[in-house]
Amino acid sequence: MEGGGDSGALLIALRRILRPLVRLLITRAIPYTNAADILRWVYVDVASREFEIEGKPQTDSRVSLLTGVHRREVKRLRRFDAPAFRAPKSATLGSQLITRWTSDPIYLDASGSPVPLAYMEADEKAVSFERLVRSVSTDIRPRVVLDEWIRLGIVHVDERETVHLDTDAFIPKRGDEEMAYYFGHNLHDHVAAAAHNMTGASPALLERSVHYNNLGPEAVEELERLAGEQGMKGLRAVDQRAAELQRQDSGGDLASRRINFGVYFYTEDTAEPGDGPSQDE
């Protein structure tokens, strides 16, 4: 089924990568035919755009040769463009606001932590939640943002109408368009970094993990807390420095690149069905 050599090893890895994705697709009632159509289109699109021979047009025949997709199907698929992958407005606003609150020095205390904000101050120049929202967007009322964030558990308001940030990141509620966007955004970048390294490209990109088995539930709970604490310290440090550098570079001729730095934590029984024994055993 998988073939031999390096390609065989890669196909075995692909089977494992696809398992949680297929589990999600089945959970969301997305059948194989839909996923297969998308995979076929992506094969054709990547071959068309990224495997050209310099000075020669990329023909349907060559794309068919590269992908194994029939030439008539290649011709049909090359006429269509996928919908643009853009962040929903609410996700863009939410992430910008929390980034500002957790990285801009005027919203931080001496230890670098985000300070609680009065909802509104008489002095327009004083820090407040209202000022925070209006510094990012004047198209939406601060009260609308506050009510939605309270509902999502991102903030809480005390008896003095002071707004406290309860999370260090914009975390969309389950099933929302925003969550689907970050699912595609973050997994794309993680896979892209690993694929970059698999090709032997230089310099290699950061893509590391720590993995152990033979752990009990209490040990996993402790490690999950530790990973959360240390991971958020790293994220906050990169976030604050990136915000400083963005303000410095913004508008420059070379300010055309983006970065994504993330952490994750996962736990399960040692072997998934169909994957065989853990390699650590």
Image: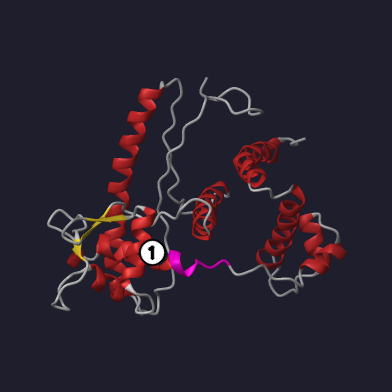
Using the image, determine if residue 47 lies above or below residue 138: above
Mark 1 — residue? 94
Using the image, determine if residue 221 lies above or below residue 23: above
Using the image, determine if residue 34 lies above or below residue 52: above
| Corner quadrant of residue 13 | top right
The N terminus lies in quadrant: top right
The x, y position of residue 26, in whole percent, is 67, 44
For label 1, the SS is helix
Q: Amino acid at mark 1?
A: Gly
User: From the viewer's perspective, is 32 left or right of 136?
Assistant: right
- Which stretch did the figure color magenta? 85-91
User: From the viewer's perspective, is 130 left or right of 181?
Assistant: left
Q: 83 or 62: which is nearer to us?
A: 83
| Corner quadrant of residue 7 | top right
Q: 6 or 116: which is nearer to us?
A: 116
In percent of the image, x 43 and y 43: which residue is there?
Answer: 264
Q: Residues within 10 Å of mark 1 (few under 14, many from 20)?
A: many
The x, y position of residue 10, in whole percent, is 65, 40
The x, y position of residue 225, in whole percent, is 32, 35
